[in-house]
Image: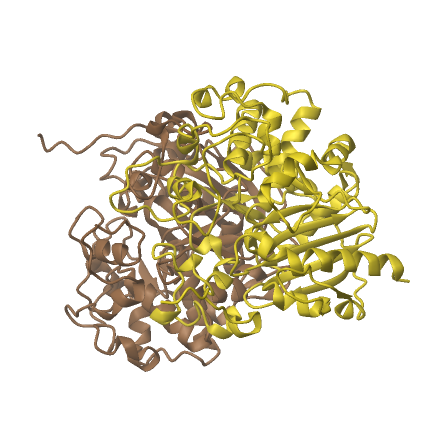
Chain colours: A yellow, B brown
Amino acid sequence: MSNTPPTYPKAQDCDAVQLGWMQGNPPPTDKLVRFADMSMRAFPQSRWASSHYRELVPTKNIARGALPVAALPRAERKDLDAVAFTPRSGSMGSDERMTWAESLHANYTDGIVVLHQGRIVYERYFGALSAELPHIAYSVTKSFVGTIAMCLVHEGLLDEAALVAHYVPELAHSAFGNATMREVMDMTTGLQYSEVYTDPKAEIWDYARAGAWLPKPTDYNGPNSIYEYLQGVKPQGQHNESFSYKTINTETLAWVISRITGKSIVDNIQERIWSRLGVEQDAYITIDPTGTAFGGGGLNTCLRDLARFGLMMQNNGQACGQQVVPQAVVERIRQGASPQQFTPAGYVTLPGWSYRSMWWVSHNPHGAYMARGIHGQAIYIDPTAEMVIARYASHHIAGNMGIDPESIPAYHAMALHLMAHPAP
Amino acid sequence: MSNTPPTYPKAQDCDAVQLGWMQGNPPPTDKLVRFADMSMRAFPQSRWASSHYRELVPTKNIARGALPVAALPRAERKDLDAVAFTPRSGSMGSDERMTWAESLHANYTDGIVVLHQGRIVYERYFGALSAELPHIAYSVTKSFVGTIAMCLVHEGLLDEAALVAHYVPELAHSAFGNATMREVMDMTTGLQYSEVYTDPKAEIWDYARAGAWLPKPTDYNGPNSIYEYLQGVKPQGQHNESFSYKTINTETLAWVISRITGKSIVDNIQERIWSRLGVEQDAYITIDPTGTAFGGGGLNTCLRDLARFGLMMQNNGQACGQQVVPQAVVERIRQGASPQQFTPAGYVTLPGWSYRSMWWVSHNPHGAYMARGIHGQAIYIDPTAEMVIARYASHHIAGNMGIDPESIPAYHAMALHLMAHPAP
């Protein structure tokens, strides 16, 4: 065995439809994608699974409600595929230019939509994804949870300075107990928990088994739910020293939200956001063995509906003629947190960024900010360019640092192009 | 241990909301309802599970499509709760009269809607069910599959006289191989398969484990899908001797439909029926480990949408101004099959009935016919009274023979009442 890293087919060569995953009545045995054997998490089967989660695991509906669909006028244009940018060097090892169209395959994009001034200027689907099919958003989910938490702060129901144990006594003896809600929201807690996806011993896999988003071994005797897992998390380092991306902060935040509101995080997402955006379709979320939703990464939505969430943020919290999220909440999120606390986390693709209330804030001249999920899920909001990009992807790399080089420069180039060449 | 049969609480005393199943963040351990420990199939937990299947097992969406919702005008009236009838004796042991309102609790009703001349004259929900929540329809699913099959017959794509093996060669060596499609559709096949729910050794439990609607034992080495199970079904008796209710006929029919159309049974339900009724909500269906839908009993819908399916049948196949199902198909279903072949099956609550193309036909003076599912799921169509009743229930008894005594006389009494006292 050499130490050569595994090689992966190009996106064009592992199209989920062309590969025939789960096709046929019944599908041939070698084309099955399943939860129990973990094939749903193997690449390239993951390219099919990403838009078929509900066929693999239990899920909870998030209803679109009774609002009429909020129209997204179409102003599609042919010049955008040629928008060129220089991928961030380091990953590419050259300064070669890349076009927007090329970046889509480079990023194993399943679907992407670009809104400019509230209109769809670009929309594409690849492989197993179609406009009507929900796709897993992974940690983009966190930005929904963080936004709801900030609404509760705005309403005076959630005290950022209060300790977690104040809201969830069950967490008093965990590392979360003496963390403030602000530290949880900004992920500056000191927790013994690693989220390095390439490390099979990272604690994220214990959390995953507890929550049953990975199968449990037959001799498993660990915690049997997300919240049971949280109660056993041990401290490491100090709170409020530096940003460290740990999904379990969001689960704790979701738990606090449910305790404050007396409603599950699902009901909160549905009532406070999803039913107020004029989305086209119901969304859904994956759940643990106690029926508790994965606030850290379980949301599945259709792509245009995800863009509508971004558009609401771009529009200072307004959608369907209503103030869905207070403008002050959007502004506080956009302001970001401390880049100094962010830098030690080592995100070389995000220099000068910060993490605020479960959003990634660029602090670039446009004030762009993002919701981000593993394998390339993204909402990119550029308030200056009045641009929202929503992207679903099934990259073989989990961590976005491996995907950012051909993504973030592309988004910014698109913003500059749309500003320089607005539609008539 | 005595031989006293188990006693069950009255419906009013096991309301799923009042019992607190799956309530709380997280729910207490003793209030969990789950798939793995089979609590979802235990009574009274089943009263919650019946409207929360997607939170317990993988499911596949059945989209409502782009049609506007077909309005069901409301003409609710207060006289219907008092409609009285005599429950079929034998179960009650008396000729005491019962009111419609009393029958709802007697039948552990979760929801019921009565349409008269296309208008909602009565609608009630109990316990965990609400108007926007899909409920498991169990074998009511079969009537969707049978209706689609009859459409294919009408289109000349399915030959009723052809043998199953002609369409699905994989079944050639099973008991199905030399059965005609008509025998499959009317369940007059000779199969070694018992569907006696109270017998733990009945083959239905093997089918259930194969399809993973029951957990598999750790030492399980049987078939791993519905269709793998079908291939091993052995003959017993002769085809075309008598009716014998065996769900695996519907699974075979669904397989044939998917082979003829090149589309899954889910796509067929969605394209041929669900997207053409103007329903309010998406439906969904449970699936086996190969992603194959349970054509025999996996459908979940909202109650009013189920009533819309019945209304389309009442309206000779028309809905939303279109001919969804050919009138000739509806007429053939309504005609029923041979009561002589039906009688030996011993359904004492259904004297003179027959089973045709996955529908139960009363041959009563009104020409009423039904779709029926275990634990009390029902669509009752009375063309003479222009009445459709859709009912979801979570009775502790699986077989409808235990539920019919307080149901079928109630339906007929309601029909007579509505005919005698039409709304203004």
Residue A136 percent location from the top left of the image: 54, 52
**Farthest right residue?**
A424
Query: Viewed as shown, does residue A185 lie left or right of B103?
Result: right
Q: Which image quarter: residue B5?
A: top left
Kindly identify the residue that appears in the image at 41 percent across and 78 percent down: B158
Q: Which image quarter: residue A182?
A: top right
Q: Nearer the viewer, residue A80 or A187?
A: A187
Q: Is any atom of residue B303 visible in this view?
A: yes
Query: Viewed as shown, does residue B149 lie left or right of A391?
Result: left
User: Is residue A306 shown above or below A221?
Assistant: below
Q: Nearer the viewer, residue A21 or B386?
A: A21
Q: Is any atom of residue B419 visible in this view?
A: no
Residue A279 percent location from the top left of the image: 67, 49
Kindly identify the residue that appears in the image at 47 percent across and 52 percent down: A54
Query: Viewed as shown, does residue A78 lie left or right of B279?
Result: right
Residue A173 percent location from the top left of the image: 42, 21
Q: Nearer the viewer, residue A191 or B70?
A: A191
User: Is residue B303 shown above or below B189?
Assistant: above
**Farthest left residue?**
B1
